[in-house]
Image (tube, rainbow, N blue to C red):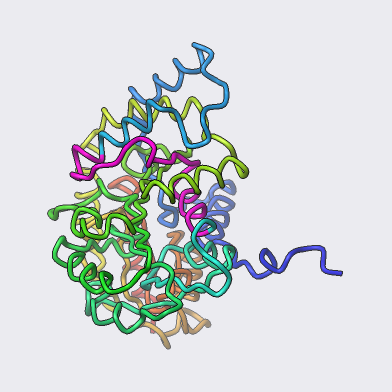
Amino acid sequence: MNRLSLRVSQLTPSATMSVDAKTKSLLQAGQPVINMSVGEPDFDTPTAASLAGIRAIANGKTRYTAAAGTPELRQAIAKKLQTENHLTYTPEQIVVSNGAKHTLFNIFLAILNPGDEVIVPTPYWVSYPEQIRLAGGIPVFVKTDESSGFKMTPQQLQAALNEKTKAVLLNSPCNPTGSVYSRNELALLGEILENHTAWIVSDEIYEKLVYNVAFTSFAEACPQLIDRTLLVNGFSKAFAMTGWRLGYLAAPPDLAKAVASLQSHGTGSPSTMSQAAGVAALQSLDTTMIQAFHARRDCLVKGLNQISGLSCLNPEGAFYVFPNVSAVFGKRYENRIIETAVDYAELLLEKQLVAAVPGEAFGAPNNIRLSYAVSMQDVEEAVRRIAAFHNMLN
């Protein structure tokens, strides 16, 4: 008898975590690796948020909260959504979870039955397909590429929709591509979805990290669909709070109630002191981090596009670039032929100590993902090393 369930036996390990583990092993061995594989801001949590968490501990606020989160944080999130996104939610429509990843997992468990389909544009964040499958659903991939700015078109959405479609997943700004849907682009997708019953799962975790463009929430662009929109956001990216594990859902009342009930039987409430930090974080966004990411992005994109064999779109958000490396497929590095992005990433790490994630992990086998959540010095050195790597190809 198999000791493990089919659901976990069929899981694909996270490629980003795998690359990060190899990178950290090299770092522990004293190798000067530039780790551009993991999406984690290299800034500290805002001081006000950290102090709020410390005060919560010092004042004995270390007990369980309501499964959906503290009234204070849910109210603060509702206020944020009203003020910044012009969306009206009551605190009862907010469910706070242990990170946006947990929020997404809750959603798929709450809405999917076996065989239900979820439309997922590619490239996609690595955990989307696995979470959908764990919940019994079937991811249906819609391929995008550089020609569309890595964005799903209304025509593609229309062609993918059918009677089995239970949800459509949107991620803007996007991990791994950095693409950002404009208000008009979202509205056009919304026009297609008006004639269907599917949920819209809108992952907006990189909302604050946009450059020279305006961010628009899906529900703001398509208010007629707010009763089918499941808005996902959190604190990890904009507030450099990855380890605090704090995300949230804004949803119609019935779905929010169902997710809160589900969470009560799974993890219970999120960390009490993290929630206290979250309230303070919403009042203390520091644009210094965003400005630094903007400058790093410009430096990295310019440098990569000057390297023969690379082409890289200029991302409008998040903190990743997603260069196309397929022009070097078939070329040789010493005695090894580069046939895939996996080969490219493995050799780049081995020979030049730059850690990247191969695009296969995101459903885009011609690309690699590089995170610029590293210092400007590391960005500049990474460009130099990648150029040196390409100079060795023949």
Q: Quadrant of the C terminus?
A: bottom left
Residue 267: x %, y % from top left: 60, 41
How many callouts does the rendering have?
0
Name the foreground residue: 75 vs 35: 75
Magenta residues, dominant SS class = helix
Q: In this view, does 250 lie to the left or right of 272?
A: left
Quarter of the figure with residue 364: bottom left
Q: Specify whether residue 362 is painted magenta.
A: no
Q: Residue at x 31, y 53 (%)?
A: 319
Residue 323: x %, y % from top left: 31, 70
Quarter of the figure with residue 226: bottom left
Question: Given the current orientation, which residue lies at the most extreme front position?
Answer: 254
Residue 90: x %, y % from top left: 32, 37
Q: Residue at x 26, y 60 (%)?
A: 225
Question: Given the current orientation, which residue lies at the most extreme right position?
Answer: 1
Q: In this view, does 179 lie to the left or right of 119?
A: left
Q: Is residue 166 above or below residue 228?
A: below
Residue 244: x %, y % from top left: 47, 35
Q: In which quarter of the image is the N terminus?
A: bottom right
Q: Is residue 244 above or below residue 305?
A: above
Q: Residue at x 54, y 57 (%)?
A: 109
Question: Given the current orientation, which residue lies at the most extreme bottom position?
Answer: 330
Name the foreground residue: 134 vs 392: 134
Q: In this view, does 45 lie above or below 14?
A: above
Quarter of the figure with residue 160: bottom left
Q: Is residue 67 above or below residue 307?
A: above
Tell me the magenta residue range. 81-108
Name the foreground residue: 155 vs 255: 255
Q: Specify whether residue 89 is painted magenta.
A: yes
